């Protein structure tokens, strides 16, 4: 006696479902590894930019201090003295801006 094997026929929906499930099972780990690598790279770039910002802030603070130092009255008087100029307080006039003159009154 011969045994007759019956073949089960799958519908198109079942084949697509199994194919989709198979692809998802094998593609998910690769997608996770790729997304973690991308996230790690982005975090590295963020830390690099934060370090650059901190360095630039320190440079800006240093330059601000240098500007304040160079603009100080003592420094101006020292440079004036080196150039042969003298500081005479009687020659200094204070200019007061009158708003009524500007408005045409």
Image (cartoon, grey):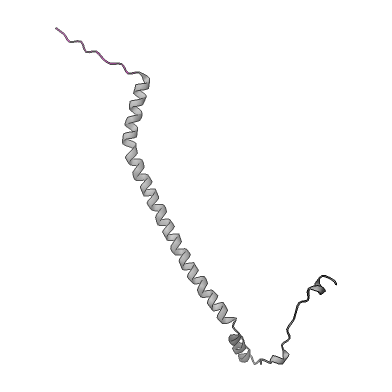
- Residue 20, percent across and down? 36, 29
Q: Residue 62, relative to residue 12: is it above or below?
A: below
| Left or right: 91 as drawn, with respect to 8 | right
| Left or right: 72 as drawn, with respect to 40 | right
Task: Look at 34% across and 22% down and name the residue there.
Answer: 14
Q: Residue furthest right?
A: 105
Q: Quadrant of residue 80?
A: bottom right
Q: Residue furthest left?
A: 1
Q: Residue 69, relative to residue 46: is it above or below?
A: below
Task: Look at 57% across and 81% down and name the residue there.
Answer: 70
Q: Residue 16, relative to residue 37: is it above or below?
A: above
The quarter in which the N terminus is drawn is top left
Q: Nearer the viewer, residue 28 or 79?
A: 28
Confirm whether the magenta stretch covers residue 9.
yes
Task: Look at 72% across and 90% down and name the residue there.
Answer: 91
Q: Residue 100, relative to residue 24: is it above or below?
A: below
| Left or right: 32 as drawn, with respect to 85 | left
- Residue 18, percent across and down? 33, 26
The quarter in which the C terminus is drawn is bottom right
Q: Quadrant of residue 17?
A: top left
Magenta segment: 1-10
Confirm whether the magenta stretch covers residue 4.
yes
């Amino acid at each position: 006696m011969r045994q007759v094997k019956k073949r089960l026929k799958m519908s198109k929906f079942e084949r697509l479902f199994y194919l989709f499930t198979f692809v998802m099972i094998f593609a998910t780990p690769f997608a996770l590894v790729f997304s973690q690598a991308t996230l790690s790279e982005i975090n590295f770039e963020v830390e690099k930019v934060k370090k650059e910002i901190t360095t630039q802030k320190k440079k800006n603070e240093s330059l601000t201090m240098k500007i304040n130092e160079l603009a100080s009255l003592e420094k101006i008087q020292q440079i004036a003295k080196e150039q042969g100029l003298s500081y005479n307080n009687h020659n200094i006039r204070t200019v007061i801006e009158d708003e009524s003159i500007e408005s045409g009154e």
